[in-house]
Image (spheres, grey):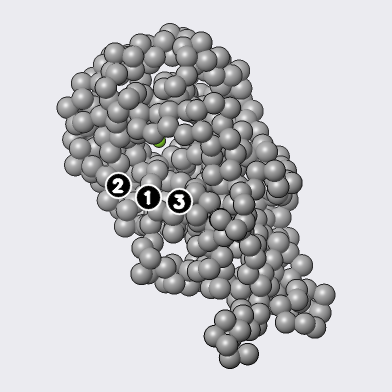
Amino acid sequence: MGIGKPRSGMRSRMTPAIVDQVDVHALVFPTPEPESDGTLTWDHTGVVVVEVHAGDHTGLGWTYTSPAAAELVRSVLAPQVVGQNPASPSRLWERMRRACRDLGTRGIVMAAISAVDIALWDVRGKSLGLPITELWGTHRESVPVYGSGGFTSMSLDQLDAQVDEWLAVGCPAVKIKIGENAGHDVARDRVRVARVVTRVRGAAQVMVDADGAYSRGQALRVGQDLDILGVTWFEEPVSGEDMRGLAQLRGVLGLDVAAGEHIAEVSDARSMCDAVDCVQLDVTRCGGFTGWRRCAAYARAAHVPVSANCAPALHLPLGMADDHLRHVEWFSDHVAVEAQLLEGAPVVRDGRLTASRPAAPGHGYRLKDVSRFAVDGASTGQGTVRSLDEQRLRRLSDCGER
Ligand SMILES: [Mg+2]
């Protein structure tokens, strides 16, 4: 057998598989038109996909982030898992995090770790022939969602149409973006929220997300108006980094104050639980299934409900295994991406997210042909890391020692 060749054909079934190879792909999915929230405008969604090969099984993971994370997976994280036994994803999670100590372990670094961790859990489930929800224990077969999108860049007619779509599939709540133009167009924020409240006619709760656009004083005044309108959720009324501001608003407003979508570490979750009514966690940013479950366990201990931020397909198995999860965000951009990315993407029925393949081993999703969304490999780090032997050979070659 040549160095670096997949070993699956030679391995006895009694011998534990090791991770033979890690593939990483950087993808970009254009949005139909430019979209905005209170503090950002974008025209695409970046996705970094990781495939972990171990013996006869391939695990799939992904994160929503810049293609730059692909290079981090290829050069820093893959060497930590290739050649290792994937039976304990949390052990490999620790290896990856330790390797990133001097890079910082938040932001794009933890997003990259998240993608690899998700792929490792998928391999774990497949190697046992079990859905990952059964590894963790299944509490329920479906999870409540809320419709989410309502970008500030939408016309009022577009907003109406999107709200109607969410109501048609039974969403018990809908969320729109406010804080337009970094909080400089509060009058239009009020018009849009009032329009949605009128549109749903009590059939769904109305939630808003300011993405940190307001100052503390602005957020207080807007929040008082939202209370009068009957809005139930005020997300990132101020920056998610302003714990004191969030805590002050929580203390005086009637609606729920929520934040946490950028949490990367358990210590971040601990701080956020002291400041909000409901902490948000994003499995693609807080360390994959391993990191998410650690953060969620802290929130449970602190008696703070958890809501899942975006990435509905990945939050479904977590919500099935953890009845402490209040709801999953059915975010329009990610719903569109997951339909193009995955075979077996989940569906919403009667306002609840439901698995398309509940008995499938692993998380149950398979990668579609997404080559048309791939970004140029040379500039994004798209590529493959094979066995440790091949890496060692390459290093020796690079050093002229071969
Ligand atoms: Mg948000």
Q: Decide: marks 2, 1 in contact (CB < 8 A)? A: yes
Q: Secondary structure at mark 1?
A: loop
Q: Residue at x 21, y 31 (%)?
A: 215
**Visible in this render: residue 327?**
yes
Comparing 248 with 71, the one in front is 71
Mark 1, other Cα within 10 Å: few <14 / some 14–19 / many ≥20: many
Q: Where the N terminus falls, by quadrant?
A: bottom right
- Labelled disc at residue 165: none
Locate residue 339: give its quadrant.
top right
Alpha carbons under labels 3 and 2: distance apart:
15 Å
Q: Decide: marks 3, 1 in contact (CB < 8 A)? A: yes
Mark 2, other Cα within 10 Å: few <14 / some 14–19 / many ≥20: many
Choose the circle earlier in sequence order: 2 or 1.
1
Locate residue 396: give its quadrant.
bottom right
- Closest to the camera, between mark 2 and mark 1, is 1
Quadrant containing ligand 1: top left
Find residue 150 and report its horizontal and vertical position in percent. 47, 23
Find residue 263 and report its horizontal and vertical position in percent. 37, 50
Comparing 113 with 70, the one in front is 70
Q: Which residue is mark 3?
A: 285
Q: Decide: marks 3, 2 in contact (CB < 8 A)? A: no
Amino acid found under the numbered disc labelled 2: Met
- Closest to the camera, between mark 3 and mark 2, is 3
Q: Which residue is mark 2?
A: 272
Relative placement, left or right, of 277 versus 122 is left
Q: Which residue is mark 1?
A: 263
Q: Where the C terminus falls, by quadrant?
A: bottom right
Comparing 223 with 232, the one in front is 223
Alpha carbons under labels 2 and 1: distance apart:
8 Å
